[in-house]
Image (cartoon, coloured by chain):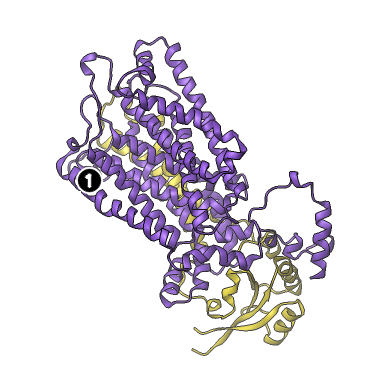
Amino acid sequence: MSDSVTNLEELKKLAPPAELQRAPVVEGNKGLGWLTDKLSVFAEGQTPLWWKFFFAIAAFCATVIFPICLFYQVFTGVGVWGNNHPVMWGLDIVNFIWWVGVAHAGTLISALLFLTKQHWRTTIGRMAEAMTVFSVMMAGLYPAIHVGRAWFDWFMFPIPNSNGLWPQFKSPLMWDVFAVNTYLVVSSAFWFMGMIPDFAIFRDRATTRVRKGIFSFLAMGWTGSARQWHHYEKAYVVLCGLCTLLVFTVSSIVGLDFCTSQIAGWHATIFPLYFVIGAVFCGFGMMLVLLVPLRKWCGLENIITLSHMDKVAKLALVAGLIIDYIYAMEFFIAWYSGDTYERWVFGHRLFGHTYLYLGWMLIGINVLVTQLLWIKKIRSSMWALFIIGILINIGMWCERFVIVVGSLYQEFLPANWGKYMPTIWDIGLYIGTLGAFFMLYLLFVKFLPMIAIQEVKGVMPEADPHHPLGGSKKGGQS
Amino acid sequence: MSAKPYGVIAEFSTPGDLLRAAQKVRETGYSKWDVYSPFPIHGIDKLMGLKNSLVGWVALGGGAFMFLNIVFLIWFSNDFDYPMIVGGKPMFSAPMTFVPAYIMLIMGGALGALIGMLGINQLPRLHHPLLDHKRFALASRDKFMLVIGAQDEKFNVTTTTQLLESLGGANVEIVEDKE
C-alpha cells in the first residue's frame, strides 16, 4: 500500500502542467466499488417524482394520442393527412427523416468514438445507443403507414407469394427498407451486447428474487472470465466498425430517395452527405436535450461531467459548420447551374411566400444559433445547451420540411402548384411518436443500466495494471 | 449429486496483483485456470496465451453469407423470376445490387459477431458453479478472482490452496460443483 502512495506522489511530479492534462473521465472517483454503486443506484432505488410526472405525460401521448391518430389514419386513408397533389410527401416523410437523423448521432457517439479510443464516450455511449434504437423504431413506422395500405406492407419484403411478385431492387426506396430494418437490428444488437456485462452486475447486486431472476435471464450466465472478455472485446470492435459504416449508409440512402428524382431542389449530388451530416447534427441536439436534465436528476454530474458536455457541444458545432457549408453550396450550385427551376425553388425558400418563415428559421437556427457554441461560457452553461439542443432539433425539422415540402409545392408547371398544411392527424401522430420515444427512454433510464458500468470502470486508472492505483509496483513494473 | 470441487478461488483487489499472481500460476505449470474481472484487463490475454478470437471470422462468415444471398435473391427475383424493365436499366447489374448487398453484409456481420461471441463463450447458459459461490458476486464489482479448475492435472486441494495464498490471494476457498 505504501508503495502505491509514494508512487502516486512521484507520478504527480512527472505529470504535465494542469492546463495540459486531460480532464478525468469521472470526477471525484472513489474507487471501483463506489463507481458500481453510483451507476446502478438509480435503477435500483425509489422512483423519483420527476420520473413519474414525465412518464405520465409521455405515456399519455404514446398510449392515447398515438393509437388514435394511427388507427384513424390506417382505417380511413392517407387523405386524413394534409398530403395532396402536388405535395405527396408531407409531414410523414419529414418526420421519418427527422427521426432517422436523431438516431445517427447515437451510433456516431458510441461506435465512432470507440474506434478512435475516446474514453469519455463510455459515460454517454449507452444513453446514445438507446436514443438510436428508440428513434429508429419511430422512424420505421412512418414509411410503413405512408404507403396508405399498411396491410400490404409485406409487399416491401422479398417474400415468395402466390401473385408471383417480387420487389424491384433498382429503386432507392427499396434500399430504404433494407437500410432502416438493418439499422434497427444492428443497433439493437450493439445496444444489447454492451449491456450483457452490466446485466450481470445488476444480477449480482439484486436483492429480490424477481430482480435476480430477470437479470440472470438477461445476463445469460455471464461470468466475466478473461476468455469471455477476450471474445467479447473482439465482437465489440467488429460491431463498432459495422455500426460506423451504417451511420454513413442509412441517411445516405434516404438522401438518394430524393436526389434520384428530377424535382428541382432535390436533384443534387450533395444530398447523401447533406442528409448524413444533418442527421448527426440533429442527433447531437437531441443528445443535449436528453443529457442535460438526466445528468442532473439522476445525480450523474460527476460521471457526465461538464467536460463531456463541452465535447458533445463541440461535436454539435462541427456538424453545424459542415451543414452551413452545405447550405452555402446548395444555394451556390442552384445559382451557378443557371437552371430556372432550381433558382426559383431556392429563391422561394427564403423570399417566397408560403414557407419563408421556415426557411428563415432554418438559417437563423442552424447557421446563427450554432455559432454560439464557439463561446466557452455557453458550452459550460447547462441551460444554454438545453435550449440550443431544442433549437437544433426545431431547426433541423424546419430544414426537412423546407426540403420536402418546399421543393414540391411549386413544381415545373404553375398548373401543378399547390399548398400543403398539416392536419391535426399529422401533428397528433408526431406528438404520439415523440411520446412513445420519451416513454421508452424513461423506461430504459429507470430499469436498465443507463450508463455502461463496465466500460466506465474499464477506463479508470484503477483498471490499468500499469498504474499505481491499479496495483503496479514501484518502477512501473507490473 | 455429490458435491465435488469445481476449483479453488482466490480474490485480489487490484488488476496488477491479479496479473502477477496469474503469471506465477502459469509458471507453476497450471493450464486450466481463468481469471474473472469486472472489465477486460489489459495484458491478460497474452499472459493466458489466448489466441486471436475466432469471433472476427464468424462475423466475416455471416457477412459473406448474407452478401451472397442477397445478390442471388436480386438476380433471381429481378432477372430470372420476374423480369421487369424500369427506366431502360439492365435487369441485373452490379451497381444495382451494391447497396442492398452492402447493407445485408453489415447485418450478417453484426449478427455474426453477436451470435459468434455468445456461441464461442457458450452462452446463454442456465448455470455456472461459480455463480453459486457467495463471494463471486464481487467479481462484477471491484474484486479480481483467479480460479484454478479441478480438471487441471496438477490440481490438488491442499497445494493449490497454499499456492494461491502465498501469492497474496484473499479468501482462498474451494468452489463446489453441485451438479
Q: Residue at x 45, y 27 (%)?
A: A364
Please name the residue shown 35% across and 46% down the image.
A434
Q: Colour of chain A?
A: purple
Tell me if residue B144 comes above or below residue A110 in the rendering.
below
Give the chain letter at badge 1: A
Q: Is residue A362 visible?
A: yes
Looking at this rendering, what residue extends furthest in the left direction?
A76
Residue B129 vs residue A311, the one in the foreground: A311
Residue sitting farthest toward the bottom: B2
| Front residue of A403 and B136 | A403
User: Residue at 67% across / 82% down in the picture?
Assistant: B172
The residue beneath circle 1 is A69
Up-down: is A105 above or below A463? above
Q: What colour is chain B?
A: yellow
At numbered mark 1, what does the secondary structure look like: helix, strand or loop? Answer: helix
Residue A222 in the image, given as x and y percentages of width and height: 52, 68
